Image (cartoon, rainbow, N blue to C red):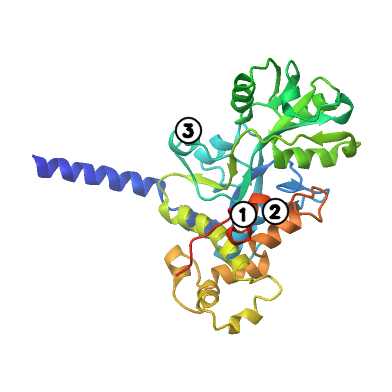
Amino acid sequence: MIRQWFAICAAMVCAVGTAAAGTLDDVKAKGFVQCGVNEGLPGFSIADDKGEWSGMDVDFCRALAAAIFADTSKVKFTPLSASARFEALQKAEIDVLSRNTTWTAERDTGMELQFAAVTYYDGQGFMVRRSLGVVSALQLGGAAICIQTGTTTELNVADYFRVNNMEYELVAFDTGEDLISAYNKERCDAFTADASRLYAERVNLSNPDEHAVLPEVISKEPLGPVVRQGDVQWFNLVKWVHFAMVNAEELQVTSENVDEMKVSTNPAVKRLLGLDGNFGEMLGVGNEWAYNIVRMVGNYGEVFDRNVGANTPLGIARGINALWSKGGIQYAPPIR
């Protein structure tokens, strides 16, 4: 009886694993990665007039395509609202969600989803019109606060105002477009979201200098790519695409010098570039997977600087997104 029970359990586990697995094979079969992104967030995912996408989250999708196909064009983008993003992934309408999405306990354990890595460490903040004379979030007692539904921001705001014994009025919207429109029409005193989004949205305002992002950061918002639970091979590949980009920056391997670095005698560089070991094969791709990522997309620092860094309209400092060796917390396990 006991033996029969174990056999039944083993069969059930096997069936669940088989049903959930196979994303990499499906991606290879159709010839592209279907990537869910934000509908329009400068610096992270936004399409131009020609329909060409750019941003940190977009570049991650291209890096995944580079690892699998050695071709960054082998990716298609699905723009998703905050409220629609998880269902699209659960229903396998997309292969990976790369859309400024916060890693939380509920999302990681209660939605049959799995966060693969943290590509951007963020925190929630507030933006106000300078004309209000507000220089601290602690001055927002009694204010009307604009938020977007389907995000973590509503609960964070409730916690912050409760802890600081302040009243507030919540003005909620389903879409980011409606939220920004309401803020522009002064239907609210402040707009709250992840700080990276505040900087991104400020760029598009008619007079960006008339608006200020307040100094307080009221939450932890680790953002990163999400996959469905149960597909270990796909989860590992998505995770190690990010780790490869971070390791490349740490080893000073860039898109400009990656071919020159192939003659390096540094064992870590040789493993990264597929010259030693079979790490790509372990992930289900070619051994030059990381070399192709760096050559075609760049290392983590290049992607950050290109999309949101100091010399972009967003002008975001590396801060905690700097490498661990440079005062930040971006850290990747070694390829060995």
Q: CA distance from mark 3 to mark 2?
A: 28 Å
Mark identifier at residue 152: none
Mark identifier at residue 106: 3
Instruction: Tell me whether circle 2 and circle 1 mark residues in contact (CB < 8 Å).
Output: yes
Q: Earlier in the sequence, mark 3 or mark 2?
A: 3
Please state the horizontal and vertical placement of residue 241, each as a whole percent of the image.
55, 60
Dot 1: element: loop
Circle 2: residue type: Arg
Select label 3 or label 1 by which is in front.
1
Which picture quadrant has residue 297?
bottom right
Which residue was labeled with disc 2? 318
Q: Earlier in the sequence, mark 3 or mark 1?
A: 3
Please state the horizontal and vertical placement of residue 2, each as a whole percent of the image.
10, 41
Which residue was labeled with disc 1? 328
Q: Residue placed farthest to the right in the image?
A: 207
Residue found 76% across the figure and 18% down from its top: 143
Residue 199 horizontal side relative to residue 156, left or right: right
Q: Residues within 10 Å of mark 3 (few under 14, many from 20)?
A: few
Which picture quadrant has residue 300?
bottom right
Q: CA distance from mark 3 to mark 1?
A: 27 Å
**Above or below: residue 152 compared with residue 291:** above
Q: Earlier in the sequence, mark 2 or mark 1?
A: 2
